[in-house]
Amino acid sequence: MGTITRKMVELAQRKGAEMSEAYGLDARELSIDVSRGVVETMKLAEDRGIGLRIFKNGRMGYAYTSDLDEKVLEGTVERALANAVWTGEDPYHVLPSKVDRYPQVDTFDPEIGNTSVEAKINLAKEIEAAARASDQRIAITERSSYQDAEYTVSIVNSRGVDASYRGAYCGAYAYLVAEEKGENQTGFALSYGLRFSDINPVKVGQEAAHKAVRMLGAKRIASKRMPVLLDPYVVTQFMGILTPSLTAEAVQKGKSPLAGKGNTLIASPTVTLVDDGRLEGRIASAPFDGEGVPSSRTVLIEEGILKNYLHNSYTARKEGVISTGNGTRGSFRGTPEVGTTNFYLQAGNKSTDELMQDIDYGFYVTEVMGMHTANPISGDFSIGAAGLLIEKGRLTTPIRGVAIAGNLMELLQNIDGIGNDLTFFVGKGAPTVRIKSLPVSGD
C-alpha cells in the first residue's frame, strides 16, 4: 500500500498539485454471532482503498477509490484536481511536514490472526454458556459475539511524510434477556482491546447476565431531586455529548459552549479529562493520526479547569498553535476531522461502595435512553433512565420508567465523587461518578 500511496502523490504533484496527500487503508474484519450454542452469522469483510487530498490555489480537492488498477488511480488523481476547482479558497489549508520520529505504540497482536476461526467461535459460545449457567432466568441470547480486525494504514504527502503502521484489535459482546413471571429485562457486557489473551468470555457472559437479572421486578419511584451515581458506561455516553464542545472546530464555528473559557473553572475540581492517542493497550492508540501527525496525550480539563481543545492541522493553523494529533479518519472515503482517540475521565480513589455509603436515598443509573436528543451546543438533556435505588448506602430496588434532566455543564460542576473503576468501552473510558443532586422524574 505504501508504494501505491507514494505513486499517487508523485502523480498529483506532476499534474499540478501544490500539496498532496494519499491515505491508504487495507483492513479485514471478522464477526461471529452465536445463539443457543449455534453460529447464527459469521462475516468476513475486507476494505481496501486510497483517499487523495490535493491543494491548489488555496483550494482543496478530494477523491477516493477502492479499485487499485493503475488507470483508475490516475483517474482518481484527476478527479481530485477537478474537484478543487469547485471549492472555496482557504488560507488555512495545510499538510503536516515530516517529523524525525513517531512515538512507539504497540498496536498489533499476532495472536489475533494466528488463532483459528474455530477457537473464536468457541469463545463466543463460551460467553453464552457462562451467562446461562450463571442464572436459570437467562431466557434469550440476543447476541453472543466475537469480533476482530486487522489493518494497515499508510500516509504519504508531498511535504515528506511517509509513514505506516499495522494494527489489530479484538473483542467480545453479550446482550441477553432475563425472564421471570412474564417480565423481561435486558443486560449487556463487552470487552474490547488489543490482545486476544485479555478477553475473558466467562466474565463477559456473567456480567451481562447479572445486569439483566438485577433489573427483574423493576419499579417506578416518585419524582424527587436526589444524589445520583452514574455507571461508567452511562458516563461515557454523557462524554459523547461533551466531545464536540472540546474540539477546536466547534469553537471556531461558534458551536461550543466552552468557547472563550480557557483556563477557567468549568467543572468540579475532581474532574480531569484526557485524550491520549498513545495509551497502552487501547484500541484507538496509534503512532500518528489520520494526517501523519504524531499522536499525543492532551489534558483537556485538569482539576476542573479547561486547559486545551482538540486540534487537527487545519484548526491548529487557524489558531496559530500545534496540532494535538486529533485529525481522526475512520476510512479512506473521507477527509480527516477533529475527533477523539482514547478519551477518558481520570479515575478517582474511591470504590463504588464508598461513593454510596453516605447516600440515604439516591439513584444509581445503569442505563439511559434517548441520549441522542441531548443538545451538544446548549448542553441541555432530558433522557429516560433505569437503574437501582440507593437506600442507606446500599443498592436495593431496581428502577425503570423514570427520567433525569439537566444541563451538562452544571452536571460537571456538581460532580462530588469519582470512583477508582476506570473502564473503557472501545474509545471512551470512565469510572463511576457521583452527582451531588439531580432531578429524577417518576410518578
Image (cartoon, rainbow, N blue to C red):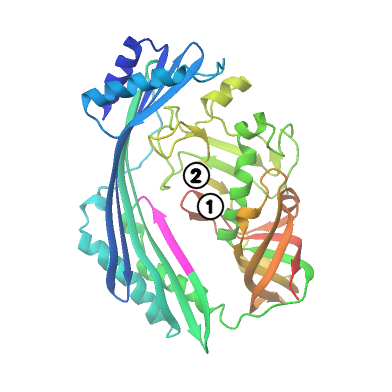
- Give, as a single range, the part of the protein colored magenta: 188-194
Residue 286: percent from left, percent from top: 40, 37
- For the C terminus, the image quarter is bottom right
- From this view, report whether residue 75 is shown above or below residue 176: above
Which label's residue is closer to the chain start, 2 or 1?
2
Q: Residue at x 41, y 48 (%)?
A: 281
- Look at mark 1 in the image and give the residue it sits on: 429
Residue 318: percent from left, percent from top: 60, 21
Q: Which amino acid does label 1 sit on?
A: Gly
Are the residues at dot 2 and dot 1 in contact (C-beta closer than 8 Å)?
Answer: yes
Q: Which amino acid does label 2 sit on?
A: Asn
**Residue 107 painted magenta:** no
- From this view, report whether residue 75 is shown above or below residue 277: above
Q: Which element type, helix, strand or loop, lies under badge 2? A: loop
- How many neighbours does mark 1 have within 10 angstroms: few (below 14), some (14-19), or many (20 or more)? many
Asked whether 217 or 99 is in front, the reply is: 217
> Residue 342's mark?
2
Q: Which element type, helix, strand or loop, lies under badge 1? A: strand
> Residue 297's mark?
none
Q: In which quarter of the image is residue 166?
A: top left
Residue 357: percent from left, percent from top: 69, 71
Asked whether 396 or 48 is in front, the reply is: 48
C-alpha separation, residue under disc 2 versus residue under disc 1: 8 Å
Q: Which residue lies furthest to the bottom in this view?
A: 181
Give the left or right position of residue 255, taking residue 203 as reference: right
Give the left or right position of residue 1, taking residue 91 as reference: left
- For the N terminus, the image quarter is top left
Residue 303: percent from left, percent from top: 68, 44
Main SS of the magenta part reads strand
* Residue 100 visible at all: no
